[in-house]
Image: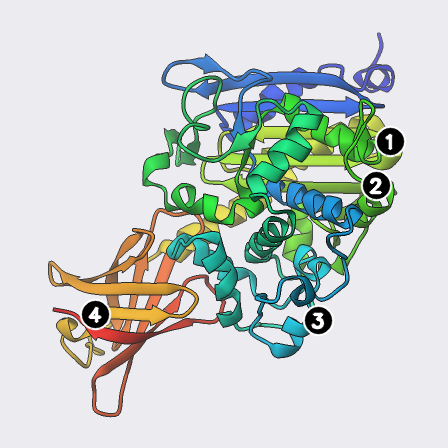
């Protein structure tokens, strides 16, 4: 009898479909699609489960999924192509090419390059990414607002993941190419690669045809996510270059083949090998232990996480939007790559990618399902804890009537919020349409919750002027981060 280990030495993908089906069931993910490429060819492509639970429609190799932040490498590729064309230099100050570019710090403004934006080292804190969810604006407006975002670390001091930096990079692509970011990718990347099904998040791309619907696991149930009611879906187009691509495993396999092929595939060259090596090379160390454990990498390149596994360099990027997850990963030395797309927000792609690598690399194997299951449990627990509403402190009533808090408050980057009184409680509303009831905790401190994954809780603490009038509101939007101060500009009724 031949052992399974021996069989896998001859055929690493033996019983692989059974493995995917078992972990999909374990995570209760309705549908998942997986592609594996090796030595210049797609050697495996298969859909599992359902893209539409209610209608019992299966996932196929052509089922489209939003890929979230796995969009970022495409933006880095666009930048690299402009570098090849002489329209941009990775290390020159971006302000030299785009005079309107500004960051909060003058030194950073005068020295920040496109390399700094793409490697997440401008000093813009990660929690400011919530800006696009609260106050959607057209891209040029978002670009202009960067100057109002105070840095939380020194320029080039540390890795701080920033979707806003990638939104700025996308704007740079538009300014220097004379094309929209979407048109640039469609004409110069998707079309040459034959990525015919790849598009961008909008009502058309997420309805009709072979498209996955989004779901979330709530307790013991799998429930649909309402795209029309989700603020993230409604706003993501504004930061498209950070996370708005929709694709399938057939197209994404071509994308991986391009990256493994040194910038060309099927005789078509999109980018020089020299610049592509820069995109794939470590640029910034990732110091946070939790982040490193999650992304399985200790450095970030230009649009890619760069790590190692069993002495092999692994280049990858995952992505998440409500109801969807993606993982794109490859090992250049083995000419091996993996794409995983699923229709729940989970870490299933990490599990499947690591299983593939263990099968091809051999040696000791780890229970990746248990590892990433534990990490995901911690994320779920943190979300639940963030949404917990503490008991109201009866000994610390608000110093002014609720009606005194009502009004409009404004921040130069985050836009305006409106506070109103409804049913004897405060309500806060953001420009994006996101709303939350504010529960009184003590004195001027209130707390609200939302169903948004990226904004589980809102802490609101009102500030009083010397005359006792309400002067502003400090919003704590991400636990453990600095509050964002909104000044009052108008009283409520």
Residue 72 location, x and y as percent? 63, 45
Q: In whole angstroms, how far apart are the C-alphas of marks 2 and 4?
A: 55 Å
Kindly identify the residue that appears in the image at 79 percent across and 41 percent down.
314
Kindly identify the residue that appears in the image at 77 percent across and 31 percent down.
258
Q: Are marks 2 and 4 in contact (CB under 8 Å)?
A: no
When the figure is inspected, residue 312 is found, relative to residue 209, above or below; the finding is below
Of residues 49 and 59, the one drawn nearer to the viewer in this rendering: 59
Q: In whole angstroms, how far apart are the C-alphas of marks 1 and 2?
A: 21 Å
Residue under pointer 3: 111
When the figure is inspected, residue 489 is found, relative to residue 92, above or below; the finding is below
Count every numbered label the image shows and give the total: 4
Whether residue 221 sits left or right of residue 198 in the image: it is left
Residue under pointer 1: 334
Q: Quadrant of the N terminus?
A: top right
What SS does tag 1 mark? helix
Q: Residues within 10 Å of mark 2 (few under 14, many from 20)?
A: some
Q: Are marks 3 and 2 in contact (CB under 8 Å)?
A: no
- Residue closest to the far front: 178
**Mark before the other along the chain sequence, 3 or 2:** 3
Residue under pointer 2: 272
Nearest-to-viewer mark from 4 and 3: 3
Kindly identify the residue that appears in the image at 83 percent across and 24 percent down.
267
Residue 407, labelled with which disc? 4
**Mark before the other along the chain sequence, 4 or 3:** 3
Nearest-to-viewer mark from 4 and 1: 4
What SS does tag 2 mark? loop
Q: How is the image coloured?
A: rainbow
The answer to whether any part of residue 352 appears in the image is no
Q: In whole angstroms, how far apart are the C-alphas of marks 3 and 2?
A: 26 Å
């Amino acid at each position: 009898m031949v052992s399974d280990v021996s069989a896998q030495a001859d055929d690493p993908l033996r019983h692989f479909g059974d493995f995917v089906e078992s972990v999909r069931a374990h995570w209760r993910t309705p549908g998942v699609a997986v592609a594996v490429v090796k030595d210049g060819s797609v050697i495996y492509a298969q859909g599992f489960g359902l893209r539409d639970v209610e209608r019992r429609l299966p996932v196929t190799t052509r089922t489209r999924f939003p890929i979230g932040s796995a969009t970022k490498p495409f933006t880095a590729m666009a930048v690299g192509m402009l570098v090849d064309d002489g329209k941009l230099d990775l290390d020159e100050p971006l302000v030299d090419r785009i005079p309107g570019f500004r960051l909060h710090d003058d030194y950073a403004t005068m020295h920040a390059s496109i390399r700094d934006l793409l490697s997440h080292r401008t000093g813009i804190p990660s929690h400011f990414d919530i800006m696009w969810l609260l106050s959607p604006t057209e891209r040029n407006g978002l670009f202009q607002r960067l100057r109002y975002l105070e840095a939380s670390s020194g320029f080039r001091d540390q890795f701080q993941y920033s979707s806003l930096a990638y939104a700025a990079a996308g704007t740079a692509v538009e300014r220097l190419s004379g094309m929209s970011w979407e048109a640039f990718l469609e004409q110069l990347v998707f079309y040459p690669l034959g990525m015919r099904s790849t598009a961008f998040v909008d009502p058309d791309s997420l309805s009709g045809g072979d498209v996955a619907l989004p779901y979330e696991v709530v307790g013991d149930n799998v429930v649909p996510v309402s795209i029309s009611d989700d603020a993230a879906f409604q706003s993501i187009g504004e930061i498209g270059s950070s996370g708005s691509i929709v694709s399938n495993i057939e197209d994404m396999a071509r994308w991986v083949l391009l990256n493994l092929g040194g910038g060309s595939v099927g005789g078509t060259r999109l980018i020089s090998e020299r610049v592509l090596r820069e995109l794939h090379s470590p640029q910034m160390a990732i110091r946070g232990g939790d982040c490193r454990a999650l992304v399985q990498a200790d450095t970030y390149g230009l649009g890619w996480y760069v790590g190692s596994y069993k002495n092999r360099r692994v280049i990858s990027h995952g992505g998440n939007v409500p109801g969807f997850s993606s993982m794109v990963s490859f090992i250049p030395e083995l000419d091996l790559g993996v794409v995983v797309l699923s229709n729940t927000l989970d870490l299933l792609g990490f599990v499947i990618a690591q299983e593939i690598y263990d099968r091809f690399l051999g040696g000791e194997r780890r229970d990746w399902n248990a590892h990433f299951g534990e990490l995901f449990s911690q994320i779920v627990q943190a979300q639940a804890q963030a949404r917990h509403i503490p008991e109201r402190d009866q000994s610390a009533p608000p110093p002014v009537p609720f009606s005194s808090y009502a009004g409009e408050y404004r921040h130069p980057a985050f836009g305006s919020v409106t506070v109103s009184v409804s049913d004897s409680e405060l309500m806060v509303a953001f420009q994006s349409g996101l709303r939350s009831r504010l529960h009184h905790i003590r004195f001027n401190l209130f707390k609200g919750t939302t169903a948004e994954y990226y904004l589980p809780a809102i802490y609101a603490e009102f500030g009083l002027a010397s005359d006792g009038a309400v002067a502003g509101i400090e919003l704590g939007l991400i636990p453990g981060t600095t509050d964002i101060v909104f000044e009052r500009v108008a009283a409520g009724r």
